[in-house]
């Protein structure tokens, strides 16, 4: 997988805190982390931004 920020190599990595264990993609060049929640929120944000009308004067 290619990093959307720097086009570097993305590796699957395991992350955990006290109660949750999840897997995400992490870029080995710039450190960008993308998981399911991040990509869903970005997709929703882009959709909402595209649907807003452009103000006319």
Image (cartoon, grey):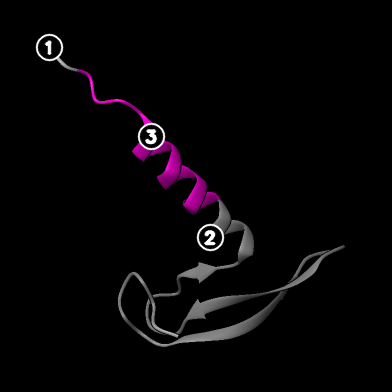
Q: Residues within 10 Å of mark 3 (few under 14, many from 20)?
A: few
Residue at which label 3 appears: 51
Q: Residue at x 87, y 62 (%)?
A: 19
Mark 2 or 3, nearer chain start:
2
The answer to whether residue 57 is left or right of residue 35 is left
Q: Residue at x 45, y 74 (%)?
A: 31
Task: Give the residues drawn in magenta, as a range.
Answer: 41-55
**Tag of residue 57:** 1
Q: Residue at x 30, y 25 (%)?
A: 53
For label 1, the SS is loop
- Return the x and y of residue 56 as percentages of the image width and height: 16, 16
CA gap, disc 1 and disc 2: 35 Å
The answer to whether residue 24 is left or right of residue 8 is right
- Return the x and y of residue 38 as percentages of the image width and height: 56, 58
Residue at which label 2 appears: 39
Name the one closer to the observer, 27 or 44. Answer: 44
């Amino acid at each position: 997988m290619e990093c959307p920020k720097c086009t570097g190599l993305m590796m699957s990595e395991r992350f955990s805190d006290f109660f949750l264990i999840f897997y995400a993609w992490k870029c080995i060049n710039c450190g960008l982390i993308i998981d399911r929640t991040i990509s869903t929120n970005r997709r929703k944000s882009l959709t909402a931004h595209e649907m807003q009308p452009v103000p006319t004067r």
